[in-house]
Amino acid sequence: MELKSITIDLLIGFITLFLLTKLLGRRQIRQLTAFDFIFSIVLGELLGNAIYDPEVNFLYILYTLSLWGLLMFGVQLIEQKFIKLRKFISGNPAMVIREGQIDYKKLKETRMNITQLRSLLRQEGIFSLKEVEYAILETDGELSILKKSDYEQTMRKDLNIPSQSVKLPIILISDGQVLWENLHKHNLNKEWLEQELLNNNIHRFDDVLYAEWSEGEELYVIPF
């Protein structure tokens, strides 16, 4: 009898979720906002608790899922019709890199640090911050990037340019902290780093948000 009850509850839950999905429209996983994510978690929790609670009948499941789905549908309608409320519910995209410079204030507003930003850039195939002209953190957590024109991808073979080995840039300063291990590993020292910063009119390590170095190139520095 218990298996029969669970089977009926599962079928009702499946059909209800299917109808809710059709009602709420299609949206890719990458497009889910934080609000959508919370909605999905609560919906799954409601369904799971209802199915395995023997004291809950199918009418309760149907009512709960339908009410929650209608609430979400109402939120979507509000987002479509009222721009100000849309910004409040889903948030705004944040330009974390502008004209090649990290906007530290925006970075703090998004609760993101340099390490997380670099991770998102690497996922987009960018291993050096100096390649980026603009970067926008979208409301779904994805990073949209516009490269500097000097770093736009061009096929070397099309220009008859011989290929060269590619090396990763070395991070020497992050969030005002010198990464001494990286410095010493590449036979660099404190005096050299201080001189490079002086060349950029920077006198203290804690004034540097980010600094990276590539062999054969100058130190790339982003101040706070």
Image (cartoon, grey):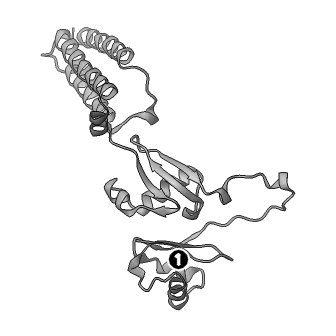
Residue shown at 51%/83% (left/top)? 197
Name the quadrant of the N terminus: top left
In percent of width and height, residue 95 lies at 43, 52
Q: Nearer the viewer, residue 220 or 192?
A: 220
Classify residue 27 by image quadrant.
top left
Q: Nearer the viewer, residue 124 or 57?
A: 124
**Farthest-out residue, right:** 160
Classify residue 38 by image quadrant.
top left
Residue shown at 60%/52% (left/top)? 125
In percent of width and height, residue 96 lies at 43, 56
Q: Is residue 71 above or below residue 198?
A: above
In percent of width and height, residue 194 lies at 50, 87
In percent of width and height, residue 221 lies at 51, 73
Q: How many marks?
A: 1
- Tag 1 secondary structure: helix
In the image, is 124 to the left or to the right of 53? right
Q: Is residue 46 above or below residue 16?
A: below
Characterize the local packing of mark 1: few (<14), some (14-19) or many (20 or more) Cα atoms within 10 angstroms: some
Q: Amino acid at mark 1?
A: Asn
Q: Which residue is mark 1?
A: 182
Q: Nearer the viewer, residue 81 or 188?
A: 81
Classify residue 213 by image quadrant.
bottom right
In the image, is 2 to the left or to the right of 23? left
Name the quadrant of the C terminus: bottom left
**Farthest-out residue, bottom:** 191
In the image, is 142 to the left or to the right of 36? right
Residue shown at 33%/59% (left/top)? 108
Q: Nearer the viewer, residue 141 or 180?
A: 141
